[in-house]
Image: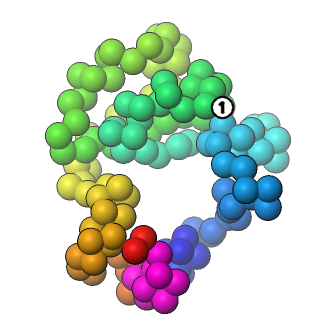
């Protein structure tokens, strides 16, 4: 699906770094970041996540390593309080790697899109036609 989203955008390319593993083990963001770091020790890495997802970062695998390996761009979400970031157990140095993007405020998330798809609700306003067709053809999220 990422390949479909990149079509027509020469500045974007899809990667198979996070594809399903042959041993069926889960992919962890920290592992992906370590692989990217191994490819280039000098390239600055950025992770972009919604605030709702970032607030769960302490529950992710190796959260401190995640903050060490990449800068984090956290996008505000409706219903999420930016003040909740203050409650996260990160040091000042770790917090300095978190950058808030507060002027996007998209009213949907991947979780919401998957919920709507499971309920067979229309998502034409949230998905490109090629992604929507791929989901339908492969009977995803049903």
* Structure colour scheme: rainbow
Q: Is residue 107 visible?
A: yes
Residue 23: x and y in percent read 80, 56
Which SS class for mark 1? Answer: helix
* Quadrant housing the C terminus: bottom left
Residue at 49% from the left image edge and 10% from the top image edge:
91
Task: Give the quarter of the image for residue 41.
Answer: top right
Which residue is found at the position 48% from the left and 24% from the top? 58
Q: Is residue 43 magenta?
A: no
Quadrant hosting residue 127: bottom left
Q: Residue furthest top?
A: 91
Q: Nearer the viewer, residue 136 or 119?
A: 119
Looking at the picture, tell me which residue is in the foreground, 72 or 60: 60
At horizontal 33% and vertical 15% (from top left) the residue drawn is 87
Question: How would you classify the magenta stretch by its main secondary structure?
Answer: helix
Q: Position of residue 128 (x, y in %)?
A: 38, 80
Nearest the camera: 70 or 136? 136
Where 63 sits versus 80, above or below?
above
Residue indicated by mark 1: 69
């Amino acid at each position: 699906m990422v390949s479909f989203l990149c079509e027509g955008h020469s500045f974007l390319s899809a990667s198979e770094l996070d594809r399903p593993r042959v041993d069926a083990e889960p992919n962890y963001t920290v592992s992906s970041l370590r692989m990217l770091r191994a490819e280039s020790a000098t390239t600055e890495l950025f992770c972009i996540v919604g605030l709702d997802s970032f607030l769960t970062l302490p529950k992710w695998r190796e959260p401190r390593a995640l903050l060490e390996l990449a800068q984090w761009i956290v996008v505000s979400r409706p219903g999420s309080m930016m003040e909740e970031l203050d409650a996260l157990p990160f040091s000042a140095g770790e917090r300095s790697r978190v950058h808030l993007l507060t002027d996007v405020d998209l009213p949907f998330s991947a979780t919401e899109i998957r919920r709507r798809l499971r309920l067979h609700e229309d998502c034409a306003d949230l998905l490109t036609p090629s992604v929507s067709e791929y989901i339908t053809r492969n009977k995803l999220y049903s």
